[in-house]
Image (cartoon, rainbow, N blue to C red):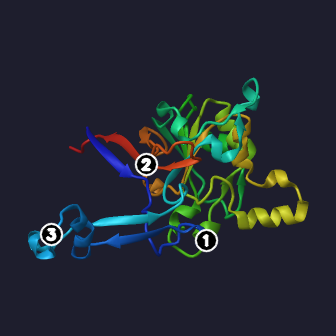
């Protein structure tokens, strides 16, 4: 057997469509030939030519949201309270309070790439996909959803691509003990451009962010903007997605990876 690690994370980078323009990250890069002046104040009298090859250090300054790049959303992002369906609403936990054992568990992949952009996945569709792959959910398994958005990352239509997980679909998972999920789309829910049209027809505000709002009833986390999900089997792997520890925050960046063993060919 050989251990294989698959990177499930997108880059945090400039000039690639990963968010709506107003929420895009901005990274300033400082290279070795421009940073000696950052070092000089620590060492009075230092000249650039005194440094090996006249080089300073490389460093970057990032202007980013906790929701840029591949990140883990905490229950606090979804609503101020959680677990209403488990005996009474309580304060939602922030990203620094997420149990670490949620973040390293066996993974299950649901393949919804065939569903159209904006489709809202139902509980029946989740159940049908689990039947197709022959998997019975166990508590704390991490369920990731492969949508058409994964093939559109970096393209102009990425944010509007892929299906989303509805309230009933999300609750189906949570009621079976799942506490962490993920998607290769910009959002766990259907893209806003599609929800906007449904809301315009009905003026039913419960359609807005319905998958996220399932966290009001059972607290959970999800990873957004995953990548490479098409390279994973349906099950038989682990996912590691520990978030950055940001006090009181609604999300934290994660280098999500899948880990599984492959049998060596003869």
Q: On residue 197, which mark appears?
A: none
Give the mark nearest the N terminus, 1 or 3: 1
Q: Position of residue 167 (x, y in %)?
A: 74, 45
Q: Earlier in the sequence, mark 3 or mark 2?
A: 3
In space, the residues marked 1 and 3 are separated at their CA atoms by: 44 Å
Residue found at the very far front of the displayed protein: 44
Closer to the camera in the image, 72 or 43? 43
The reply to whether residue 124 is in sight is no
Residue neighbourhood size for the residue with mark 2, other residues' Cα within 10 Å, grouped as few (<14), some (14–19), many (≥20): many
Q: Quadrant of residue 104?
A: top left
Q: Secondary structure at mark 3?
A: loop
- Of the residues tagged 3 and 2, which is closer to the observer? 3
Quadrant in the picture for residue 176: top right
Left or right position of 177 against 123: left
Residue 134 is situated, as x and y percent measured from the top left of the image, at 55, 37
The residue tagged with tag 2: helix, strand or loop?
loop
The vertical placement of 34 against 217, above or below, is below
**Label 3: which residue?**
45
Judging by the rendered image, the residue that carries numbered circle 1 is: 22
* Category of crowding for the residue at label 3, using alpha-carbon neighbours closer than 10 angstroms: few (below 14), some (14–19), many (at least 20): few
One can see residue 127 in this view = yes
Does 31 sit left or right of 161 as displayed? left
Where is residue 53, by image quadrant? Answer: bottom left
- Disc on res. 256: 2
Marks 1 and 2 sit apart, C-alpha to C-alpha, by 25 Å
Q: Nearer the viewer, residue 206 or 171?
A: 206
Between tags 1 and 3, which lies in front?
Answer: 3
Secondary structure of the residue carrying tag 1 is helix
Label 3 – label 2 distance at C-alpha:
45 Å
User: Measured from the top left, where is residue 124 in percent x and y?
Assistant: 72, 43
Residue 70 in percent (x, y) is at: 49, 55
């Amino acid at each position: 057997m050989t251990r294989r690690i698959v990177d499930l994370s997108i880059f945090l980078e400039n000039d690639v469509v990963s968010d709506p323009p107003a929420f895009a990250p901005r990274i300033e890069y400082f290279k070795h030939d421009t940073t000696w002046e950052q070092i000089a104040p620590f060492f009075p009298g230092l000249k650039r030519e005194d440094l090996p090859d006249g080089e300073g250090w490389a460093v970057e300054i990032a202007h980013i949201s906790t929701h840029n790049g591949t990140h883990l959303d905490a229950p606090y992002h979804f609503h101020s309270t959680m677990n209403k369906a488990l005996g009474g609403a309580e304060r939602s936990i922030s990203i620094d309070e997420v149990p670490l054992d949620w973040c390293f568990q066996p993974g299950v992949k649901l393949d919804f790439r065939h569903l159209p952009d904006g489709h809202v996945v139902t509980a029946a569709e989740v159940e049908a996909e689990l039947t197709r792959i022959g998997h019975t959910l166990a508590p704390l398994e991490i369920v990731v959803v492969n949508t058409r958005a994964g093939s559109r990352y970096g393209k102009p239509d990425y944010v509007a691509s892929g299906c989303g997980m509805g309230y009933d679909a999300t609750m189906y998972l949570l009621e079976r003990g799942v506490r962490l999920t993920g998607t290769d789309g910009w959002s766990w829910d259907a893209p806003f451009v599609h929800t906007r049209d449904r809301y315009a027809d009905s003026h039913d505000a419960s359609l807005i962010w319905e998958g996220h709002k399932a966290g009001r009833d059972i607290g959970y986390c999800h990873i957004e903007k995953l990548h490479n999900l098409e390279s994973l089997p349906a099950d038989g792997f682990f996912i590691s997605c520990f978030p950055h520890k940001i006090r009181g925050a609604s999300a934290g960046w994660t280098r999500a990876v899948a880990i599984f063993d492959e049998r060596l060919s003869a």
